[in-house]
Amino acid sequence: MTRTLTIVPRWAGHADSDYYPWLTTRLREEPSGFDAVRALEMPDPKQPTIDAWVSALATALGPTPAPGTVLLGHSVGCQAVLRYLATLPPGSTVEGVLLVAGWWSVDKPWDSLRPWMETPMDLARARAASRRFVVLLSDNDPFTSDFRENGQLWRERLGAEVVLVPGARHFNGAQEPEVLGALRSFSASPATP
């Protein structure tokens, strides 16, 4: 089975932002268990909308992604990934999802962010569409200060494995070894159907 990793960037992020180029290079240089790695360029990244980003994911991955697909969402990219998963037909699943700096709410939301927090999604469908969810959170994220409550919500709503990374802020570094480590755990122990 071919295994692919698709990275969905953060708000105002691009394929060459933050740790994405470093991560892509590392995963291509060493045995990672992924046959292909790509970071997406999302439409209007400074003003992302749910419809545009979910449509972009459907275009990139298809209406039914390949079984060996692993998705990595960063910040608002996490929301886009979940909302894409919620559109998949019953029985369609991806191998796993890594959500980096994921949130359900933001301490001081701006107007164009509110739809991402307030528009309902089919969480049961999203949960059923992935065999595994891992969420990386920081204890000093400047956008979501209550990491304990945030982590609990990820566990309750998606049955996610939550990993706390002290001092990681919003995971915007040029290198984020914890993200690489989390992806290696997908390669070391892929979920079984």
Image (tube, rainbow, N blue to C red):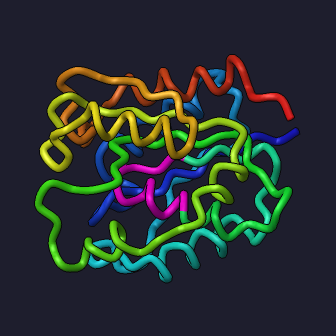
- Magenta span: 72-82
What secondary structure characterizes most of the magenta part?
A: helix
Residue 25 counted in the magenta span: no
Q: Which quadrant holds residue 108? A: bottom left
Above or below, comparing residue 83 to residue 30 in the picture: below
Query: In terms of depth relative to the viewer, which is nearer, 156 or 132?
Result: 156
Where is residue 106? Give x, y as percent.
Answer: 21, 56
Q: Quadrant of the N terminus?
A: top right
Horizontal arrangement in the rendering, residue 120 relative to residue 71 (left or right): left
Report x, y in % for residue 191.
75, 29
- Please determine whether, in this image, residue 128 is positioned above or below residue 84: above
In the image, what residue occupies the spot 23% across and 41% down? 170
Task: Indicate yes or no whether the magenta region holds residue 75.
Answer: yes
Q: How many marks?
A: 0
Q: Would you say 111 lies left or right of 54 here? A: left
At horizontal 64% and vertical 64% (from top left) the residue drawn is 86
Residue at the limit of the structure toward the top, as seen here: 188
From the top left corner, tell me how far across and down residue 185 is, in percent: 60, 20
Is residue 76 shown left or right of residue 95?
left
Of residues 89 and 98, the one nearer the viewer is 89
Residue 141 occupies quadrant: top left
Q: Residue at horizontal 44%, vertical 60%?
A: 79
Residue drawn at (26%, 71%) of the image: 113
Task: Measuring from the top left, give residue 101's x and y in whole percent.
Answer: 33, 42
Which quadrant of the rendered structure holds the C terminus?
top right
> From this viewpoint, which residue is outermost toward the front?
156
Rendering quarter of residue 146: top left
